[in-house]
Amino acid sequence: MTAPAVVIREPSLARDLIALTKPRIISLLLLTTLAPMFVAGSPSWATILWTGIGGYLMAGGANAVNMYLDRDIDQLMARTRLRPIPSGRLSPRTVLAFGIAIATAATWILGHFVNVLTSALALAGFYFYVFVYTRWLKRTTPQNIVLGGAAGAFPPLVGWAAVTGRVDLASLYLFLIIFYWTPPHFWALALLKQRDYGKAGVPMAPNIWGERETIDQMLWYSVLLLGLSLLPVTFGVFGLFYQASALALGGILLLGVWRVRARSLRGESWTAVAWSVYKFSLLYLALLFLAMAIDRHI
Amino acid sequence: MPLPLPTILWLSLALVAVSQIMILRSTVRAMRAAESEQARRGIEWAYAVVPAVALIVVLAATWQASQEHSTRLGLEAKASQTVAP
């Protein structure tokens, strides 16, 4: 019996440029941009297409500039060591130019084909991620991903504004859901990658506050998220389908974090459960936003 | 069975308020344990309070929006009773 062949892809410029945009992360950002468009109304195919392209390029530009700014710590962490800059495949200047170029293209596309507010919100998300999160918060406070979570919460505002041309209470709720989802999501990963973050000197909550306090906060953020996700039902934005989905998904997330806490308190290994919380949190956000879109059309 | 809207409102507000207070409490505890300097503690405290204040503003707007929604639902129910034979 022969062992399965391991396919090693040859690095190429195109592959590296795509890698700079972090396409796997952007797929979730795109979902949280496009689903709110169907909550806000009935967008045309052209609006969906241009918002999707603009959203991808803006987020991709922010990710590329982030890789430029974090190039010193990326080479210290196993998780990021193989990125195009630390591995020497692309020069920092090329990465910066690429990031700025595609973010500029996104600003023009969204402003020209969608509307100015959509373009301004997407650009605000770019600036927040690059300057507020990466440059300011990331290396200075254990609450970096709490406030920095706002950067990842811009996409629903972008999608909403693309359809309605404004931002209102319902869209703010979509923003807040992502904002309060970020701590349990990221800290589940940070708990598992403590050594990596410690080596790079990034003050993540588990490294500074300790595991116990971080897990406690993950639990309370999950409770807050459950309550917050139900509130749009009370002023008529969503109905029964969303209500049931938010309760079920929030309950599963909460249960997962509770299991991490219980195992930690008993002194048992919690790494496998923390990993499953991290993976489920991704599914949670995707399914919750899908439920929103479905609820509005049934 | 769907929960009545006022029940969802009160339950959700309670969950949000209690958990936000617990988050603030935990942040203070964590800052003390980390033995950070006074100035740093002030900044960390501000980072924790800013989202809480923003949340209060959104909750106030939510309260108003849910009252308006309940009134609208009440008026619609009344109108349908009047129209029905």
Image (cartoon, rainbow, N blue to C red):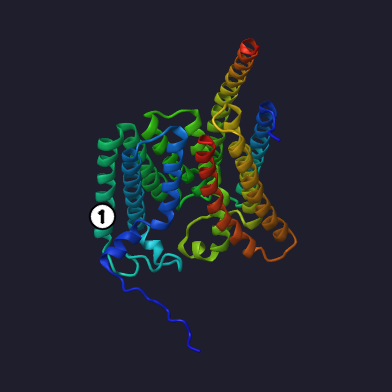
Q: Residue furthest right?
A: A266
At 25% from the left and 45% from the top, the residue drawn is A105
Residue nearer the viewer, A47 or A149: A47
Q: Is disc 1 surrounded by few (<14), some (14 to 19) or many (20+) residues within 10 Å?
A: some
Tell me where residue A163 appears, x and y as whole percent.
Answer: 38, 33
Direction from residue A297 to residue A70 in the image, left or right? left
Residue identified by numbered label 1:
A98
Dot 1 falls on which chain?
A: A
User: Which quadrant holds the C terminus of chain A?
Assistant: top right
Residue nearer the viewer, A94 or B68: B68
At 42% from the left and 37% from the top, the residue drawn is A37
Residue nearer the viewer, A174 or A222: A174
Direction from residue A204 to residue B74 in the image, left or right? right
Q: Residue furthest bottom?
A: A1
Tell me where residue B74 appears, x and y as whole percent.
Answer: 63, 16
Classify A168 as above or below A228.
above
At 45% from the left and 53% from the top, the residue drawn is A139
Classify A90 as above or below A185.
below
Tell me where residue A213 appears, x and y as whole percent.
Answer: 64, 52
Residue A118 visible in the picture:
yes
Give the mark count: 1
Direction from residue A150 to residue B67 in the image, left or right? right
Tell me where residue A117 appears, x and y as whole percent.
Answer: 34, 32
Mark 1: amino acid: Phe
- SS under mark 1: helix
Residue A205 visible in the picture:
no
